[in-house]
Image (cartoon, grey):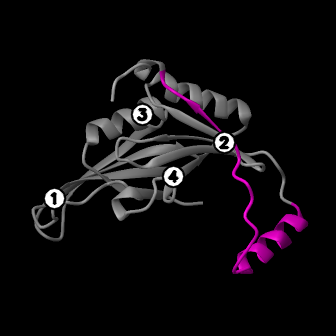
Amino acid sequence: MFHHTAFATRDSAATHAFYTDAMGFKLVKVEVAPTPQGGWAKHFFYDTGGGEMIAFWELHDESIPDTWSPAISTGLGLPEWVNHLAFAATDLDDIESRKQRWLDNGHDVAEIDHRWCVSVYTMDPNGILVEFCTTTKAFTEADHKDAERLLADPAPPVLAPPDAKFFQAPARAGAST
């Protein structure tokens, strides 16, 4: 269990709208404090359930170069799927509910059955891939042994990727890019 994770944002209004409307989280705390370099920052926290939170930093500090990116993967030159946030869904009905909420709020969704869990994915306004995931298969001792073997294998066998389903939000259907 963790207390909170924190990320930077360039657009706190869009971040707030996404995490309250599309994610269904509640804003529970905002702190405003000076930064060590003489600026200031706003740190705002959302309850994600189970006593855990996600927080964002709105930075106002001239010592921080303006070239930073809040995207935790693409900002580092990695594909967007590498570093991401995965939140727990209770079951497949919850996955469907979360997917529909995202679509209703104008966010495109990808859904993948990973053969042991099912996930839905969308992007937040900061370029961070977010996921709701539910485990659909109990882990066995054989799974544990297989995991240990694969982790230690320098050239493990590569499985075919699972099929993904893509859903375009109705509000964006037909939009030109």
Q: CA distance from mark 4 to mark 2?
A: 15 Å
- At horizontal 51% and vertical 52% (from top left) the residue drawn is 85
Q: Which residues are magenta?
A: 140-169
Label disc, if present, on residue 85 of the rendered structure: 4
Label 1 or label 4, whichever comes before in sequence order: 1
Residue at mark 2: 112
- Which element carries disc 3, helix, strand or loop? helix
* Front of the two marks 4 and 2: 2
Q: Nearer the viewer, residue 134 or 155?
A: 155
**Does residue 57 appear to the left or right of 159 in the view shown?**
left
Task: Indicate whether residue 130 is drawn in magenta.
Answer: no
Label 4 or label 2, whichever comes before in sequence order: 4
Q: CA distance from mark 2 to mark 1?
A: 36 Å
Q: CA distance from mark 4 to mark 3?
A: 16 Å
Are there few (<14), some (14-19), or many (20+) residues within 10 Å of tag 2? some
Image height of 15 relative to 170, above or below = below
Residue at mark 3: 20
- Which element carries disc 2, helix, strand or loop? strand
Amino acid type, label 4: Leu
Q: Nearer the viewer, residue 69 or 78?
A: 78
Amino acid type, label 2: Ile
* Front of the two marks 1 and 4: 1
Residue at mark 1: 66
**Does residue 57 appear to the left or right of 141 in the view shown?**
left
Q: CA distance from mark 1 to mark 4?
A: 25 Å
Pinpoint residue 37: horizontal percent, then vertical percent: 13, 70
